[in-house]
Structure formats: C-alpha cells, structure tokens
Amino acid sequence: MSRGKLRLGVNIDHVATVRNARGGDTPDPVRAARIAQEAGADGITAHLREDRRHITDPDIDGLMEALTIPLNFEMAATAEMQAIALRHKPHAVCIVPEKREERTTEGGLEVAREENQLAHFIAPLREAGCRVSIFIAADRRQIEAAQRIGAQVIELHTGAYCDAHAEGDFSTRDTELEKLREMAAFADSLGLEVHAGHGLTYETVQPIAAFPEVVELNIGHFLIGEAIFRGLSPAIAEMRRLMDEARA
Ligand code: PXP
C-alpha cells in the first residue's frame, strides 16, 4: 500500500559535533534545525548520547522550544534518558543501541533478547503520548519482537546497505537492499509504521525511498557534510527532490 509523501527527518547531531570540537556556541544545532524546517524537513532528529559527545541537554531544550515540526528524540534505553524524554514529551522517541566506544550507532537494537525489559521501558513513554520507534536491523525476529513489546514504529538500519555501496561491493549491497525491501513489507503487514535511516546519501537514498511501506527517512551525517559545500537548505532540497523522484 502506498503511503503518499515520504517524510524527511533531518538529523542535526553533527552540527553539534562541529560546535563541540571548539567548545563554543557555534555552529548552533537549533539554528540548523530552524533552517532545515524552512527548507522542507518534516521532522528533526537529535540523539542525546550518554557521553553528550554532540547534542547536549540545552540543545534538546532549545529544539523543543524552537520547532514547529516534530522532534524525533533518539536515545538509549536508560533510566536517565527515559526521565529526560518524559520531561520533554517529544513527538517521537527512537530507541537505539549505544556503545561508548562506537563512532556511530553501529547496529540495530537487540529487541528479541530484551523483550520484557524493553516492553517495561517503553510503556511510560507511550503513555506520555510519544510515538515509540525502535531502531533495528532488517531481521524478522527483531521486527516481531518490536511489535510484541508495543512499539508503534520501527526504523530499519540502512548502514550495511550504504557501507556495501560505498565499498563498491554491489553484490552485498543488493542483498542488503533486498532484505530491507522484504522486511519493510513484513513490518508493514504487522501494522508497524516503517522508517529507515543511517548512512544514506544522494547515491543510496532512491532505492530505499521507493519502498512504498517506508514513510520516513532520517538522514544526518551526509546532509551536514554536504551543507559545507552547497549550504544546508540546498543540500536538504536536493535530498527532498531525489526522495520525491524515487517515490513518483
Ligand atoms: N537513524 C538513526 C536511528 C540513527 O541513529 C542515525 C544516526 O544517528 C540516523 C538515522 C542518521 O544516520 P546518518 O547520520 O548516517 O545519516
């Protein structure tokens, strides 16, 4: 079933990464979020990590205050993050695995192994009115577990597909793409809303955007990098154009 216009969530974490490299106030991720909003982003994504390596608590305060489009608050399943989410009640929370030593979110969440714990963890977030999304690999077991714990949304990790493309390993890329296609349809058949993201670029976005079950893409690192060369608004506008073209 086609869901119409595909939403673009712009992840502004790496504006904060650049700011934090110098420890001052610029560039400001809230300003970037405002520009993204004006450039046609349908939502803003920000990941408050345990070590606050990019987004900080005041950034979340600022985003909640400034945005008229939804905030997708990415967080690990910890008591500290749950308390912050319950205080802000963002439109959506996306539960992601988090390791201190990783550079970025390397894999999906192990939902199947921690089902009871996660079900308890997300219940108050749902009760507070947040849409709960779970970031997982394109794996049937994880999708079934996400549904059982009461998540409304899953976000499929596109990192393996994008990495294989970047490495020129097109056979693996196509296998990963096929897995994503099948699992997007499977999750949709269970009544889950399907999002996707991680590592997407102008070169890799279209095959994912073409999946009719996917209703939202969350894209950050590439867009913030591209903004250095063409500016944030044009970088987002080009991604939007490619998504719409693939959807049509
Ligand atoms: N979706 C989720 C759940 C993520 O953790 C991230 C990275 O923070 C993204 C999307 C965006 O990935 P990228 O920055 O590689 O576009």
Image (cartoon, grey):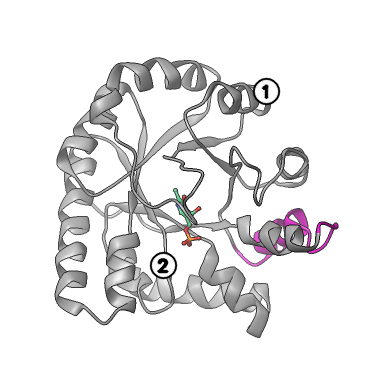
Tell me the residue at 73%/38% (across/down).
57
Q: Which residues are magenta?
A: 23-40
Disc on res. 200 = 2
Residue 111, picture quadrant: top left
Q: Amino acid at mark 2?
A: Leu
On the picture, is 1 further left or further right than 133?
left
In space, the residues marked 2 and 1 are separated at their CA atoms by: 31 Å
Q: Amino acid at mark 1?
A: Arg
Q: Is 100 inside the magenta-drawn segment?
A: no
Residue 210, picture quadrant: bottom left
Tell me the residue at 43%/77% (across/down).
202
Quarter holding the C terminus is bottom left
How busy is the neighbourhood of tag 2: few (under 14 within 10 Å), some, or many (20 plus)?
many
Disc on res. 40 = none
Residue 86 percent across, percent down from the top left? 61, 22
Tell me the residue at 41%/37% (across/down).
133
Residue 35 versus residue 155: which sits nearer the camera? Answer: 155
Name the outermost residue toward the right: 24
On the picture, is 64 further left or further right than 225?
right
Q: Is residue 62 visible?
A: yes
Disc on res. 87 = 1
Residue 66 percent across, percent down from the top left? 77, 46
| Local SS, label 2 | loop
Instruction: Say whether mark 2 is within 8 Å of ligand 1.
Output: yes
Residue 137 percent across, percent down from the top left? 27, 48
| Local SS, label 1 | helix
Name the outermost residue toward the front: 101
On the picture, is 203 further left or further right than 10?
left
| Residue 19 drawn above or below residue 155 | below
Looking at the image, tell me whether mark 2 or mark 1 is earlier in sequence order: 1
Residue 56 percent across, percent down from the top left? 71, 43
